[in-house]
Amino acid sequence: MSSRRLYPEKPLVGVGVLIRDGDRYLLIRRAADPDKGLWSIPGGMVEIGERTKDAAVREAKEETNLDVEVIEVLDVVDKIIRDEESRIKYHFVIVDFLAEFAGGELKASSDALDARWVKLEEFLEYDLSPTLVLLLRRMGLYPDS
């Protein structure tokens, strides 16, 4: 992971991609912090000169080997994590997209410990990242606790 992600001087822009295939959604298990070991959706940083939609397509391909068609913006999520001394350790502004599976064979990259297609009713069986839970709740796809 780039050292500029830790204790950044300004917020960093990222994307997340909720990939749908019929009644299934793709979850990945994160290999790096933040949220290492938790289940989330594919995503990553927007590169200089890159449109967020293009970053979503690229990140989906890099992390899962899947081709996707971006449908719409779902939400914009602030992910701000502080350390023990209350300093900002991570600060991401994440544009989350809904995308449809368009082809390819699922294969988790080095950014993901695992990748699985999951039905909505199975989400509760996974230890999901807090920002994914927030997104799913806003979409009405995850129960309030």
Image (cartoon, helix red, strand yellow):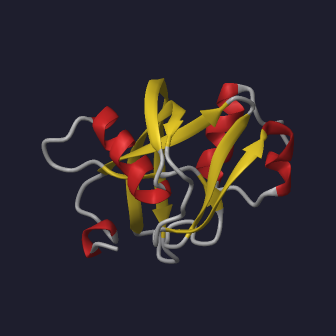
Taking the spot 79% from the left edge, 38% from the top edge, the residue there is 120
Give x and y (percent) for residue 118. 75, 46
Q: Is residue 122 above or below residue 72?
A: below
Residue at x-position 32% and y-position 70%: 7
The residue positioned 57% from the left and 71% from the top of the image is 36
At x 44% / y 29%, what residue is drawn? Answer: 69
Task: Please state the total of marks drawn on the protein image.
Answer: 0
The foreground one among 25 and 139 is 25
Q: Is residue 33 left or right of residue 117?
A: left
Relative horizontal placement of residue 48, taking residue 57 as reference (left or right): left
The image position of residue 71, as x and y in percent, is 47, 22
**Left or right of 63 on screen, residue 11:** left
Q: Name the foreground residue: 18 vs 1.
A: 18
Judged left or right of residue 81, residue 37 is right
In which quadrant of the rendered image does the C terminus lie?
Answer: top right
Question: Is residue 122 or residue 5 the one in the foreground?
Answer: 122
Tell me the quarter of the image containing the N terminus: bottom left
